[in-house]
Image: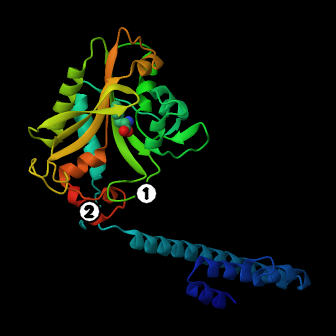
């Protein structure tokens, strides 16, 4: 029995097998245990002899099992260490690095230019109330200009903002009548347009607002000229054309000489040599009052532009949908902006 057990213990190759062997010999119904149990049937002379022999064998088996157990565990640990070892001298795997999206790159350039002129960056919600998106901007419910901006309504009072102009009133309110107000607000806007080369149902705008004492059209003009020259990196011809927005009076649109052809006429400027880059104007007195500013004491200007348009002109991109379709061949061309 002792010899058979020894052989089995020796041959055991896992802790589980060893456990089975322990049960077989030393368990409650094990072979040694039953010998010890059977002692009562032996004669008084045999008892001490068999008893001490059985106990000795039991002790020996326990010792062997214990030893085997230790060596098995050690081998297991060794195997795991082997498996998990790391060769620290191997060269690292390069992490593929993404690049800034061209649209975000241009928005950052616009922000930097205005921050350089002392503006602060403000933000507003994309889900906006009818009040801030239209009403406070001097577009009452029946105003025809609401049609210019076909909207995504969520409820009769809530919509996806169609422009960043609601941030004008929000910014004035948060300033609680203090001057100067000098903010730009970049962000997403939404309109119910069918997508084509020049329209997307979601696009971006950067709004600007300045309110202070004695702000005149000349401040607006100077600010816009500085901006246009810095973003396109060159001296440009520009012109302001009269226009209409309900929240500015007077209102203008700014054209610059076409950046792609220098004004000689190309597809981008539809052969006119001019390209419109933004809408602007002097803040309507009613909008100032809504924002908590006395329109007799303060004046202001506002402007709004589309970064997609600016980026398209700057980099000669002919389809606005490129910004939103995530074609890596397009995106990778702007690694350095
Ligand atoms: N919000 C106007 C638009 O989306 C642009 C604009 C902003 C015009 C501020 C004037 C002043 O068309």
Badge number at residue 194: 1
Which quadrant of the figure has residue 79?
A: bottom left
Residue 181 visible here: no
Q: Is residue 53 above or below residue 179?
A: below
Is 149 displayed left or right of 197 in the figure? right
The answer to whether the residue labelled 1 contacts the one labelled 2, judged by CB atoms less than 8 Å apart, is no
Q: Which residue is mark 2?
A: 330
Which quadrant of the figure has residue 253?
A: top left
How many neighbours does mark 2 have within 10 angstroms: few (below 14), some (14-19), or many (20 or more)? Answer: few
Horizontal and vertical percent position of residue 179 = 35, 14
In the image, 10 versus 305, the foreground residue is: 305
Q: Which scheme is used to colour this image of the protein?
A: rainbow
Q: Quadrant of ligand 1?
A: top left
In the image, 139 versus 67, the foreground residue is: 139
Is 211 displayed left or right of 1 in the figure? left
Horizontal and vertical percent position of residue 103 = 29, 49
Q: Residue drawn 48% across and 46% down? A: 150
Q: Residue drawn 48% across and 34% down? A: 133
Q: Residue drawn 50% across and 45% down? A: 151
Cα distance in 3D space between marks 1 and 2: 22 Å
Q: Earlier in the sequence, mark 1 or mark 2?
A: 1
Badge number at residue 166: none
Q: Is residue 277 above or below residue 16?
A: above
């Amino acid at each position: 029995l002792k010899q058979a057990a020894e052989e089995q213990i020796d041959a055991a190759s896992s802790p589980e097998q060893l456990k089975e062997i322990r049960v077989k010999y030393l368990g409650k119904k094990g072979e040694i245990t039953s010998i010890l149990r059977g002692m009562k049937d032996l004669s008084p002379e045999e008892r001490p002899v068999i008893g001490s022999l059985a106990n000795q064998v039991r002790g020996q088996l326990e010792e062997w099992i214990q030893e085997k157990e230790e060596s098995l565990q050690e081998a297991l640990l060794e195997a795991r260490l082997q498996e998990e070892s790391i060769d620290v001298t191997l060269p690292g795997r390069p992490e593929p690095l993404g690049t800034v999206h061209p649209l975000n790159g241009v928005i950052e350039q616009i922000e930097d230019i205005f921050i350089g002129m002392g503006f602060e960056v403000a933000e507003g919600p994309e889900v906006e109330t009818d009040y801030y998106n239209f009403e406070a901007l001097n577009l009452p419910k029946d105003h025809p200009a609401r049609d210019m901006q076909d909207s995504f309504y969520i409820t009769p009072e809530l919509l996806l903002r169609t422009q960043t102009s609601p941030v004008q009133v929000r910014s004035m309110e948060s300033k609680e009548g203090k001057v100067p107000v000098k903010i730009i607000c970049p962000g997403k806007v939404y309109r119910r347009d069918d997508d084509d080369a020049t329209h997307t149902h979601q696009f971006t705008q950067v709004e600007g607002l300045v309110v202070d004492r004695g702000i005149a059209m000349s401040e607006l003009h100077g600010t816009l000229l500085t901006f246009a020259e810095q973003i396109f990196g060159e001296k440009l011809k520009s012109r302001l054309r009269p226009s209409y927005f309900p929240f500015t009076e007077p209102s203008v649109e700014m054209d610059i000489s076409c950046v792609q052809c220098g004004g000689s006429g190309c597809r981008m400027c539809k052969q006119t040599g001019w390209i419109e880059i933004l809408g602007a104007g002097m803040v309507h007195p009613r909008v100032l009052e809504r924002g908590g500013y006395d329109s007799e004491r303060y004046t202001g200007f506002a402007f709004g532009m589309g970064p997609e348009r600016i980026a398209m002109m700057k980099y000669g991109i002919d389809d606005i949908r490129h910004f939103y379709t995530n074609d890596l061949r397009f995106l990778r061309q702007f690694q350095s902006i």
